[in-house]
Image: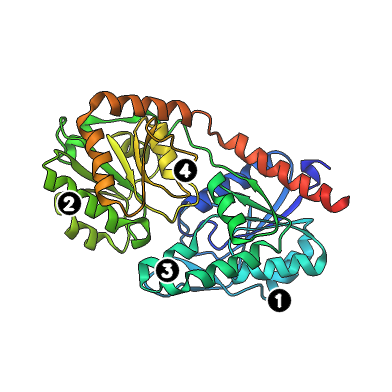
């Protein structure tokens, strides 16, 4: 079997109506599959004003807005009859689900009923989110539900080695392989650095800019970030906080770090400029399955301080390309950040090492690995 024989139905909770790391990866994957001759049809909630133009054919699935102050995201209402008829007509020989939501569950049931090969990619550590909303008691329930869901497919695509190990520890019985991530090296590179842009934000040339990049939401570790900044201030460490992104927690974050510079939402080459203009990238999130933003910082020659979690382990070489700290160790974060602020040679060496490592992460290579996995799953089924 070859790529041209593939008919892939991809089910996503968010393909392009809101921009995030997961749907960026999915769109790049679909682009690669189409380029190699595969036929792909995507099923996802949509909006009248999507964040970006989708790659490939996209079928809108009925949905509701997600409650709890996150109404920028939508939840598909399963697979209604009209959608099911469209899938029937498309006649896929492989189903790919990207989330264990109602649509994902319906797609896996469809695959089971029609004896179609199925693959699930793991993107979001939903079980960690409940810690930030005062309902941590739900964590084991969510883990158990995910264990059952991912054990029903032929193959699970984990973005990192640590995430694969976590899925094994949960008791997922499906075969687990790797779908890493790439980076746009034209956009994220040290040549994008702009001292003029920094100055326009009020950051002095001799100030070390500690950057945050991402949605301003609780689960990104904003509380830990703020506490670490308070610890640095108490030590008298000269630095500025540069925040790139928007979100519902912006006002809270601004109150916590009143001297921070907020550059707002950035995209395209402007985003590349913002990342390259940081001196240190700080990512305390434990909810990431792969550190997309961490990899982008590394590609821009920016050293990283990150939490010992699935988004950093295996990507950052501790003490070489950055520093890894236990997730709740505020003083440990402060120590790591202070070292980068005060040791110019170490900071520059870590940036160089990170840039060299990031050079090996390319979308064409990692997406070809997914295509090869599809073909291997179908061959196993045939055997």
Closer to the chain start, of discs 3 and 2, is 3
In the picture of the structure, the residue carrying the numbered disc 1 is 81
Closer to the chain start, of discs 1 and 2, is 1
Q: x, y (%) of residue 109?
A: 72, 70
Is disc 4 placed on a helix, strand or loop?
Answer: loop
Q: Alpha carbon of mark 4 to alpha carbon of mark 1: how far? A: 43 Å
Residue at 42% across, 38% down: 296
Badge 3 crowding class, 10 Å Cα cut-off, few under 14, some 14 to 19, many 20 or more, is: some
Residues at marks 1 and 2 touching, judged by CB atoms closer than 8 Å: no
Is disc 3 placed on a helix, strand or loop?
Answer: helix
In the picture of the structure, the residue carrying the numbered disc 3 is 130
In the picture of the structure, the residue carrying the numbered disc 2 is 230
In the picture of the structure, the residue carrying the numbered disc 4 is 313
Is disc 2 placed on a helix, strand or loop?
Answer: helix
Residue at 20% across, 49% down: 229
Q: What is the residue that sits farthest to the right in this orientation?
A: 383
Residue 191 visible in the shown view: no
Q: Alpha carbon of mark 1 to alpha carbon of mark 2: how far? A: 54 Å
Closer to the chain start, of discs 4 and 3, is 3
Q: Is residue 80 above or below residue 153?
A: below
Badge 1 crowding class, 10 Å Cα cut-off, few under 14, some 14 to 19, many 20 or more, is: few
- 116 or 129: which is nearer to us? 129
Residues at marks 4 and 1 touching, judged by CB atoms closer than 8 Å: no
- Along the horizontal axis of the image, is 273 left or right of 232? right
């Amino acid at each position: 079997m070859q790529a041209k024989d593939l008919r892939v139905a991809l089910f996503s909770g968010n393909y392009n109506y809101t921009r995030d790391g997961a749907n960026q990866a999915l769109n790049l994957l679909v682009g690669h599959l189409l380029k190699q001759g595969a036929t792909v049809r995507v099923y996802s909630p949509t909006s009248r004003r999507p964040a970006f133009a989708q790659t490939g054919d996209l079928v809108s699935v009925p949905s509701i807005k997600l409650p709890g102050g996150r109404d920028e995201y939508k939840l598909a209402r399963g697979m209604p009859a009209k959608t099911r008829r469209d899938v029937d007509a498309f006649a896929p020989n492989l189903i790919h689900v990207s989330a264990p939501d109602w649509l994902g569950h319906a797609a896996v049931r469809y695959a089971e009923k029609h004896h179609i090969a199925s693959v699930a990619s793991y993107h979001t550590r939903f079980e960690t989110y409940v810690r930030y909303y005062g309902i941590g008691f739900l964590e084991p329930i969510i883990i158990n539900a995910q264990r059952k869901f991912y054990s029903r497919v032929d193959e699970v695509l984990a973005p990192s080695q640590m995430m694969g190990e976590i899925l094994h520890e949960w008791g997922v019985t499906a075969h687990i392989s790797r779908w890493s991530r790439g980076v746009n090296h034209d956009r994220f590179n040290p040549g994008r650095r702009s001292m003029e842009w920094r100055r326009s934000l009020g950051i002095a040339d001799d100030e070390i800019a500690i950057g945050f990049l991402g949605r301003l939401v609780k689960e990104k570790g904003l509380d830990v970030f703020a506490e670490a900044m308070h610890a640095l201030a108490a030590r008298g460490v000269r630095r500025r906080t540069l925040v790139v992104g928007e979100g519902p927690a912006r006002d809270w974050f601004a109150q916590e770090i009143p001297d921070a510079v907020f550059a707002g939402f950035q995209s395209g080459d402007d985003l590349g400029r913002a990342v390259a203009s940081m001196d240190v990238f700080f990512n305390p999130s434990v909810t990431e399955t792969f550190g997309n933003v961490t990899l982008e910082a590394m590609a821009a020659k920016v050293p990283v301080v990150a939490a010992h979690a699935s988004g950093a382990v295996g990507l950052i070489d501790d003490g070489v390309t950055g520093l890894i700290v236990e997730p709740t160790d505020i003083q440990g974060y402060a120590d790591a950040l202070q070292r980068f602020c005060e040791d110019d040679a170490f900071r520059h060496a870590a940036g160089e090492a990170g840039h060299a490592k990031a050079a090996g992460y390319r979308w064409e290579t990692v997406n070809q690995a997914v295509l090869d996995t599809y073909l291997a799953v179908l061959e196993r089924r045939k055997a």
